[in-house]
Image: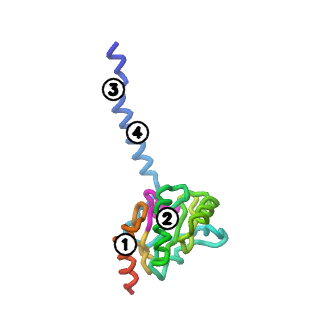
Amino acid sequence: MKTTQHSWLYFLPIIALTLLLVTRWQTSQSQSIALSSDETLPNINLPALFHPANRFTTQMLRGKVTLLNIWASWCSNCQSEHATLMTIKNSVPIYGIIFKDNAEDAKAWLRSTGNPYTAIGADPDGALAMTLGIEGIPQTFVIDKHGIIRYDFKGALNMHSWKNTLQPLVEQLNNES
């Protein structure tokens, strides 16, 4: 009786191996391209959140140092970083891309909490986020004047990360020609 009662334990390693292989296969099927710092920002051409007939494009992010923040209204970490974005919005232009979010929910959330963004693009299926190599949201890129990604900050920005990491980099990039 003891042997049959615990015989399912012999299948545990097989189940674990199967789950590992399925996870690796799904990861290899992903079309995500992880971008590292000092890579040119890929071509962006999304509908603008507040005016979908207009386009949110890569050209908007050229000619000045900017932050590109990937976020969603349903994301609790995005909500927690919002106060920081509102505080720093006059220090650097912040552009946003909503990730897999309902446009009406995102607009309503911004109307109630404030809008720190210069412009916002809508990425409802997450295709652009996959191209950018987004691992989770929020994620913020520092883009230089030439459209080069100079820093990739993963997670919620706070005043400490702004003052100690991003702000010095933004100031340095603003002083470069």
The residue labelled by disc 1 is 163
Mark 1 in CB contact with mark 4 (< 8 angstroms): no
Residue at 64% x, 73% y is 54
* Residue 40 as seen in the image, left or right of residue 112: left
Looking at the rendered structure, which numbered label has been put on residue 19?
4
Instruction: Report the residue that reaches farthest toward the bottom.
Output: 177
Q: Which residue is mark 3?
A: 10
Q: Earlier in the sequence, mark 1 or mark 4?
A: 4
- Give the secondary structure at mark 1: helix
Instruction: Mark 3 or mark 2: name the one nearer the start of the chain.
Output: 3
Closer to the camera: disc 1 or disc 3? 1
Write down the region rendered in magenta: 127-140
x and y percentages locating residue 9 in the rendered image: 34, 26
Q: Amino acid at mark 2?
A: His
The answer to which quarter of the image holds residue 110 is: bottom right
Q: What residue sits right under mark 2 in the picture?
A: 82
Picture quarter with the C terminus: bottom left
**Mark 3 touching mark 4, by CB under 8 A?**
no
> Of marks 1 and 3, which one's residue comes earlier in the chain?
3
Is residue 134 positioned above or below 58 on the image? Answer: above
SS assignment at label 4? helix
Residue at the spot 49% in from the left edge and 74% down from the top edge: 89
Give the secondary structure at mark 3: helix
Q: Marks 3 and 2, how far apart in space?
A: 50 Å
